[in-house]
Amino acid sequence: MLLYPNAKINIGLNVINKLESGYHEIESCFCPISLYDIIEVKTSDINHLTTSGNKINSDISDNILYKCLDKFNSNKKFRIHLHKIIPIGAGLGGGSSDAAFLLNFLKFISNKIISDDNLLKIANEVGSDCSFFIENKKKYVTGTGKKMDNIDIDINNKSIIIIDPEQPINTAEAYQNILPNKSKYQLKHILENENIENWSKYIKNDFEAFAFKKVRELKKIKSLLLKLGADFVSLSGSGSCIYGIYNNHDINQYDFPYKSFKVKIIE
């Protein structure tokens, strides 16, 4: 069985408050995009994972896919190969998506009866954005990232360029270097009522200041995307990838001096 976990972008990311638990309250819009990893899953007599593509720096025994197998506690074993295409440490949710797609597969193939609520519970235990990828639709995300509501935002026909500076940013480090600050504007209201050309007046990603210091090229990349006519440009997640949303442009004409992906919003 082949699985194709997709990435996501964040449109707006407000870090509102740091809780006593150490978690942060956020406000963001998550949108799934057409950039995919590939997972091959076969039944086996042992659980075993191999990888190719983008280098995964952590010990393979700590990989999030092993955590999924452990938490789901299936009565079957699997040999899994992950071909990593989604950039790592980039704010695109690739690891969480890999986990969510594997969990959905385990639910599908298993004789074990598990409710949607219990599957979401496992997803939340495995990774911060996993629950989003279980349903994999545009969502307005609040709280500690677990509260998700539908959002009416029509950008499926837009073209998106994602630029990867190939300098990963550690999410924990990014959160350690951010000062919570509530936005003046409710993100959902802006996205549903303002034209995309006006988004930059109201919408921000609180991680940009830290990310732009950490990865110096990001400021230059943002300026380049705007110069090429993007309606909206932003860091995704805590970085380090940055994207531009284009309306009536043939983005295939552009060549960038950085690793880039040309994608669409998916549903």
Image: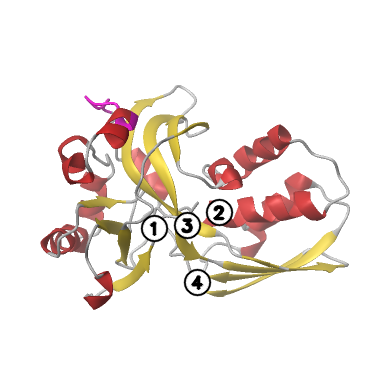
Question: Which residue is found at the position 15% from the left and 38% from the top?
Answer: 201
Where residue 143 sits: x, y (%)?
Answer: 45, 27
Spatial separation of the CA atoms under disc 1 and disc 4: 13 Å
Q: CA distance from mark 3 to mark 4?
A: 17 Å
Q: Which color scheme is applied?
A: secondary structure
Tell me, for residue 97, which label it has, or none: 2
The crowding category of the residue bearing disc 2, from other C-alpha atoms within 10 Å (few below 14, some 14 to 19, many at least 20), is many
Left or right placement of residue 71 versus residue 209 in this view = right
Q: Which residues are magenta?
A: 181-188
What SS does tag 3 mark?
strand
**CA–CA distance between discs 1 and 2?**
13 Å
- At which x and y percent is residue 188? 34, 31
Pointer 3 with pointer 4, Cβ within 8 A: no
Q: How many marks?
A: 4
Q: Which residue type does callout 3 highlight? A: Ala
Q: Nearer the viewer, residue 255 or 159?
A: 159
Query: Which of the 4 image quarters holds residue 18?
Result: top left
Front label number (1 vs 2): 2
The residue lying furthest to the top in this view is 20
Q: From the image, give the main secondary structure of the stretch colored magenta.
A: loop
Q: What's the amino acid at mark 2? A: Ser
Q: Is residue 253 above or below residue 176?
A: below
Which dot marks residue 7? 3
Q: Is residue 20 magenta?
A: no
Labels 1 and 2: the sequence-earlier one: 1
In the rendered image, residue 30, in percent from the top left (x then y), is placed at: 42, 44
Q: Is residue 5 left or right of residue 214?
A: right
Q: Is residue 255 visible?
A: no
Number of the label disc, if any, that sits on residue 55: 4
**Label 1 belongs to which residue?**
90
